[in-house]
Amino acid sequence: QVQLVESGGGLVQTGGSLRLSCAASGHTFSSSYAMGWFRQAPGKEREFVAAINWSGGSTYYADSVKGRFVISRDNAKKTVSLQMNSLKPEDTAVYYCAARKTSLVTQARHDYDYWGQGTQVTVSS
């Protein structure tokens, strides 16, 4: 099995920054897995935020975060990070880390096989 644990969430003012981390563990986890970040605001569906392929050479972002968020990974440490800058109140949500048992990146949440428990990000206006 694979376990994903997010950390780094919190309360920040508009315009501030946060860095989320996701630590992967489990004997079946592979550095070849594509990784993604999703978020879910109250009353809304879980939505794609960013994704990265196995090498880190390809990254993808939702239009709403492009230019403000940066996804990265460290395969040696089995971690994936999401640097969030210029945060807005509409970025408030629970952020989830996800892993896909393939190196191919996708924005569709149903394509991901493993999920973390989520970390709350709140941006005050």
Image (cartoon, rainbow, N blue to C red):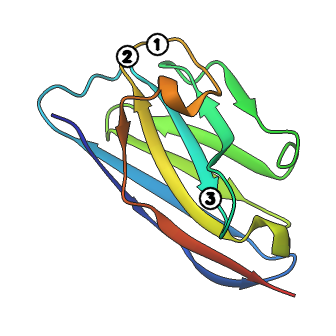
Query: From what the image shows, is residue 35 above or below residue 48?
Result: above
Q: Is residue 78 above or below residue 121?
A: above
**Crowd class of label 2 (few under 14; some 14 to 19; many from 20; radius 10 Å):** some
Label 3, label 2: how many angstroms apart (C-alpha)? Answer: 26 Å
Give the mark nearer the N terminus: 3 vs 2.
2
**Marks 1 and 3, how far apart at CA:** 24 Å
Q: Using a 10 Å C-alpha cutoff, classify the residue at mark 1 as few (fewer than 14 neighbours), some (14 to 19) or many (20 or more).
A: some
Mark 1 touches mark 3? (CB < 8 Å): no
Which amino acid lies under the numbered mark 3 shown in the image of this protein? Gln
Mark 1–mark 2 distance (CA, rounded to whole Å) = 5 Å
* First of labels 1, 3 by sequence position: 3
Determine the residue positioned at 11% across, 30% down.
Answer: 27
Q: Which residue is identified by label 2?
A: 32
Q: Quadrant of residue 113?
A: top left
Residue carrying label 3: 40
Residue drawn where x is 53% and y is 11% of the image: 104
Residue placed at 41% from the left, 51% from the top?
22
- Hey, what amino acid is under mark 2? Ser
Placement of 118 over or under 33, stated as above or below: below
Q: Disc 1 on helix, strand or loop?
A: loop
Identify the disc placed on residue 103.
1
